Image (spheres, coloured by chain):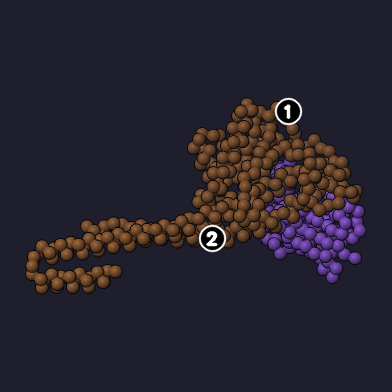
Amino acid sequence: MTFQVELVSPEDISYSGEAEMVIARTVEGGDIAFQPGHVPFIGVLSVWSVEVIRPDGERDVFAVHRGFVQVAGTKVSILSDVSETADEIDIERAKEARVSAKELIQSNSEDQEAIASLERSEVRLRVAGVEV
Amino acid sequence: MAGGKERVLRRRIGSVQNTKKITRAMELIAATRVVKAQQRARSAKPYAEQITSVIENLAAGGAEVDHPLLRKAEKVSCVGVVVISSDRGLAGPYNSSVIRAAERQVQNARSEGADYSLVVIGRKARDYFAFRNFNIDSYTEGISDNPTYEDARRIAETVSEMFSERKVDRVELVYTEFLSIGSQKVAVRRFLPLEDTEVIASEGGGDSNSSTAFEFEPSAESVLEALLPRYVEARLFGALLESAASEHANRQRAMKAATDNAEELIIKLSREMNQARQDAITTEIMEIVSGAEALGSDSEKVTEMLDLVGSSSENNS
């Protein structure tokens, strides 16, 4: 059994397809997987990856930096104004961003911007398949 | 000199022809841009609809929050006016009508005894309001004919901040709605405070089935809290995209009219020029004939001259 997955960005629908399962992480910090027939659900996504497992067993992974997930009937919509696929991620840049963010946090552990930047770079690297 | 008028007219025709070439080019460029802008406005719809549908579901789930963006002031002491105009002119009445509507909002605010705060997008509106010594609190240029979501996010943030910090108690959004390629009209919409979630929900656009009971994580309230700023951004983005499409449509129409007028003018001027030339020829003939007559009875010469005139007027006609 499959359901429809849409990754909706403000500019357009950036991904759309059939899937067997969708794995995401909400702000509470827990991973949540959706399969067809899941109860209607609305959640706020944390800065993490979203995995879409297609019927042929392949998986598409996205880095989602801010967004929502809505599951209704046979459709999963992921609303996000910043999302990237593995191909779109610049690994070198993410690595650099991670290093500089870590330095900033070491000097000031309260720096919210640096923490957010570290989170973003880590999820980028994770999605791109680089070990963190 | 008899050829003077003709020469002046010929020069004018040349200049009108050059203008026509320019307006024709602008028309064609605007025509391709309007299609692209329309396309963008269309592909941005799903996001706005989905956000609305989530709000619908939240409203049905009975989520109530005391969000700063929902604050309704008892007394409005300052009205924010967000006006979307273009950076460049030659777009017919596009800029002037949206600016006029914005100015009316400012006047309404004044007559209610409230202050105003202008958030201006596009050089044309800035020029207008700056020239008339209005206070402009925020100004953005260089985005109006091809806005990105990032632009919308930045402006929405500015406006939301002004609202949350109680610098303004109400915000009106003045932009141009794109109804179809042949029809656009100025729209004034309440931007902030946001309507209650029930009202947003009933205005709809979403395709959700409100009767289903949703699970919310972390909670309906915190979902709504995270969602409202996105909703504000999406609304502004939608307005920017529609304005961009309207701008190009207006420019296309204005340039088409200009090209048509140039064509008409060329025809009119060519007629005038031809007549001036004919007049000059007639005068010349008259001069020659009278000159010949003055030479008196030397009939041979007169015939000779008339022959000459005959052949020259043939050449001229």
Q: Quadrant of residue B154?
A: top right
Residue beneath the point at 70% across and 57% down:
B43
Most foreground residue, A98 or B259: B259
Residue at the disc numbered 1: B74
- Mark on residue B29? 2
Q: Disc 2 is attached to a residue of which chain?
A: B
Q: Is residue A130 visible?
A: no
Q: Amino acid at mark 1?
A: Glu
Residue beneath the point at 87% across and 64% down:
A2
Residue beneath the point at 58% across and 43% down:
B98
Would residue B11 appear left or right of A9 to someone viewing this image? left
- Quarter of the rendering occupied by the C terminus of chain B: bottom left
Q: Secondary structure at mark 2?
A: helix
The colour applied to the residues of chain B in this rendering is brown
A105 w.r.t. A3: above or below = above
Q: Amino acid at mark 2?
A: Ile
- The letter of the purple chain is A
- Mark on residue B110? none
